Image (cartoon, rainbow, N blue to C red):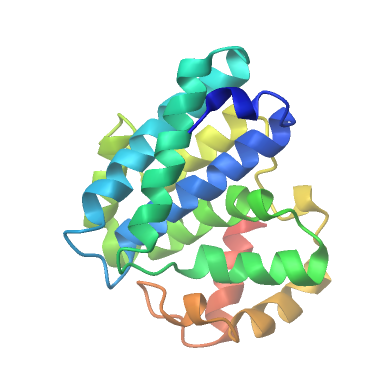
């Protein structure tokens, strides 16, 4: 890992794809197939990314922060390949990317907070570990991720991505074709459930 290799990456691209790595950490930890192999990686990856991404934006020449982000990225994706799958943030993001041209990182900026909020009635206790990893155990994880996205000056709603309300039905239908949506921790039974998540993200 060479933090200097990231110096020429446009800041918006660096931090938005950093949120994509946050998405890997969060959804692998919340996955129904989470296990002792991935859980420490998920939480440490989240901890490093939450700390380092704002530092990179504030101090672009801070190579230590960039290296922390690289380690966080590596741990987050290692958690994903340690047997824990992704969930609805990834699956809905595939529709936004392939059908509406939304950059990969921006799909996570918008969808991850919404999916966490929708899932909270099912796995709220588990989400407390995510909040603790971000240093505020008494605040909802979805709110903390949304705050991080705002601090990084990235889009935080479907409207900000240029998605129109008349697009939501199509997104809801297409999302059900992706396996991550069907293995979301809180069961998504059909497009109507996806629509609830999209309304939160709207």
Quarter assignment of residue 116? bottom left
Q: Image check: 162 left or right of 52? A: right
Q: Image check: 87 left or right of 54? A: left
Give the percent coordinates (x, y) of residue 45: 36, 41
Can the viewer see residue 138?
no
Q: Image check: 61 left or right of 88? A: right
Can the viewer see residue 102?
yes
- Residue nearer the viewer, 141 or 13: 13
- Residue nearer the viewer, 95 or 188: 95
Quarter assignment of residue 186? bottom left
Q: Residue at x 46, y 46 (%)?
A: 22
Count of numbered badges drawn on the protein:
0
- Residue 65, compared with residue 123, is above or below; it is above
Q: Residue at x 41, y 73 (%)?
A: 184
- Residue nearer the viewer, 140 or 108: 108
- Residue nearer the viewer, 64 or 95: 64
Give the percent coordinates (x, y) of residue 157: 68, 50
Q: Image check: 141 left or right of 196? A: left
Looking at the image, the residue that sits furthest to the left is: 36
- Residue 92, compared with residue 154, is above or below; it is below
Quarter assignment of residue 174? bottom right
Give the percent coordinates (x, y) of residue 182: 46, 82
Give the percent coordinates (x, y) of residue 199: 62, 64
- Residue 73, compared with residue 151, is above or below; it is below
Q: Residue at x 63, y 64 (%)?
A: 93
The quadrant the C terminus occupies is bottom right
Q: Residue at x 42, y 53 (%)?
A: 77
């Amino acid at each position: 890992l060479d933090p200097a290799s990231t110096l020429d990456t446009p800041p918006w691209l660096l931090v938005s794809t950093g949120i994509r790595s946050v998405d890997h950490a969060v959804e692998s930890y919340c996955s129904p197939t989470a296990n002792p192999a991935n859980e420490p990686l998920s939480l440490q990856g989240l901890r490093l990314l939450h700390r380092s991404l704002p530092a990179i934006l504030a101090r672009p020449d801070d190579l230590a922060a960039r290296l922390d982000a690289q380690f966080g990225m590596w741990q987050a994706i290692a958690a994903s390949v340690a047997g824990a799958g992704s969930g609805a943030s990834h699956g809905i993001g595939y529709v936004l990317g392939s059908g509406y041209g939304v950059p990969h990182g921006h799909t996570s900026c918008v969808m991850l907070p919404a999916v966490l909020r929708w899932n909270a009635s099912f796995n709220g206790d588990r989400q407390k570990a995510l909040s603790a990893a971000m240093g505020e155990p008494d605040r909802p994880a979805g709110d903390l991720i949304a705050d991080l996205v705002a601090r990084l000056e990235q889009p935080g709603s479907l409207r900000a991505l240029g998605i129109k309300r008349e697009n939501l039905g199509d997104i809801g239908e297409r999302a059900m074709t992706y396996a991550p949506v069907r293995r979301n921790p809180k069961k998504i039974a059909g497009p109507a459930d996806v629509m609830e998540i999209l309304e939160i993200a709207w």
